[in-house]
Amino acid sequence: MSLDKLKLSKPLVAAMTDAGFLTPKEIQIRTMSRILGGQDVIAVGPEGSGKTTTYVLATLMKLKYAFEEAPRALILVPDIDHVDHVLEQFKLLNLNNTFRILGIDSRGTIETQMNEVTDGCDIIVAVPDRARALYLKLALNTNKIQLFIVDNAELIVKKGLQLPVVELANSAYKSQHVVFTEVLHDKLKHMIAPFMKDSAATIEVDEIGEKQAEVYHQMLYQVPNFRTKLNLLTLLLNDAEVFDKAVVFVNTRLTAQTVYKNFNQHKEGEISIYRPLFFDDRGFDDINEFKNTPEARVLIVANENSGELNIEGIPFIFHFELPEQKETLIKRIVKHGNEDVVAITFSTDIELIEVKKIEQAIGQKLEVMELPEDLKVVDAADKPKKKKGTEDDESSERGAAFHEKKASNLKNYNYSAGAKAKMTYKNKKGLS
């Protein structure tokens, strides 16, 4: 498919060709006409799907002419590295420096940046908090902004920069709003709700790479917060018949201690920590000792001191937290021989971006599991409440990260906690 599909100007087609972009990406085909048509757009796609190039092209097409005093496009990105990346993309496609493009971040002084903005520019690429500071000092005029773009919105939420984004978006009340993100979840929807029009189009591009290796059976539980994770882990591991031997991975030794203390109603010796932080906690310094101790059922392991841990022979692997490096998790879930293992991952909204990266790396989706009926979901006020069975209650408690099921996947029965894992494990073993 040629670039003509995007209906770009001749200079932009030439710039794209010179830069080596000979065919349009799916996200460009599906969003460009909507953006150029003035519609608010939420575009969801993985890293490398062409999101940055899409809005750079759209911005250059929409502005048409240059050199006005007040900026007409404001692009918010999460950090300095993203500012540099976007500026490079503009440099690549903004032939003959047609538009004046300014990067705003913490590397310059407020006073210098105030002067640069007031001297005149067409496009500003900025981190939200510094752009807000300029706005509050009356240096950033948002009255003529036609295009308000939020890129890598999931990272902006992760950094806690929602307030400046909303304030700037509301100040540019005449503008069109476009949001690009790798994942769309409840916290992100909460950020953009005050300024996105009801008619906004949501475009999702889900590109999964080629399968790289055989992995164990994957299960994913999406939960709203840490406390609900603890409740879910406790609920699942209460089923000693199913989870007779399991390893639970967390990121730090302090978290391992927190998880360990949460198990206060189990038989002595069932729950233990790998190389515990405190001498009086039940623990093992040797993984083989855990494997060979029948009453030791669950071992909590901190990624920061796990080293080259040999977990072969353990049928259940829990990732209570996602490690900083996705390769750490992937290495554990790659299948060895004919060993049957179920790998269970817990994820909050903020961690969904890491889940996406794992799916991209292994070339397959993680199976999203229903939360158990008797799980106590902890709300924002940190008050436990029992999860209801009604549709309205389910959507309000699980949040937007929990997508509607297709009609073909709906069912009128529910399994008890651990039952699905049990059935999967038995099927893999060939048991009845």
Image (spheres, helix red, strand yellow):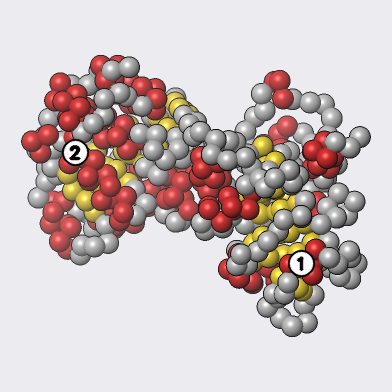
Q: Is residue 240 left or right of residue 73?
A: right
Type of residue at label 1?
Answer: Asn
Type of residue at label 2?
Answer: Leu
Nearer to us of marks 2 and 1 is: 1
At x 70%, y 54%, the residue is 318
Q: Is residue 79 above or below residue 406?
A: below
Quadrant of the rendered structure where residue 150 is?
top left
* Image location (x, y in percent) of residue 277: 68, 78
Q: Mark 2 vs mark 1: which is more N-terminal?
A: 2
Q: Name the residue carrying label 2.
A: 92
Quadrant of the rendered structure where residue 253 is?
bottom right
Task: Quarter of the image for the C terminus: give it.
Answer: top right
At x 29%, y 43%, the residue is 75
Q: Is residue 146 left or right of residue 280?
A: left
At x 10%, y 38%, the residue is 97
Quadrant of the rendered structure where residue 307 is?
bottom right
Within 10 Å of disc 2 (Cα), the crowding (few <14, some 14-19, many 20+) is: some
Regarding mark 1 in the picture, which secondary structure is present there? helix
Regarding mark 2 in the picture, which secondary structure is present there? helix
Q: In the drawing, what numbered circle is on residue 288?
A: 1
Q: In the drawing, what numbered circle is on residue 74?
A: none
At x 79%, y 70%, the residue is 289
Q: Is residue 308 above or below residue 149?
A: below
Within 10 Å of disc 1 (Cα), the crowding (few <14, some 14-19, many 20+) is: few
Q: In this view of the protein, can residue 431 be seen by the observer? A: yes
Task: Quarter of the image for the N terminus: give it.
Answer: top left
Front-most of 285 and 254?
285
* Image location (x, y in percent) of residue 326: 53, 52
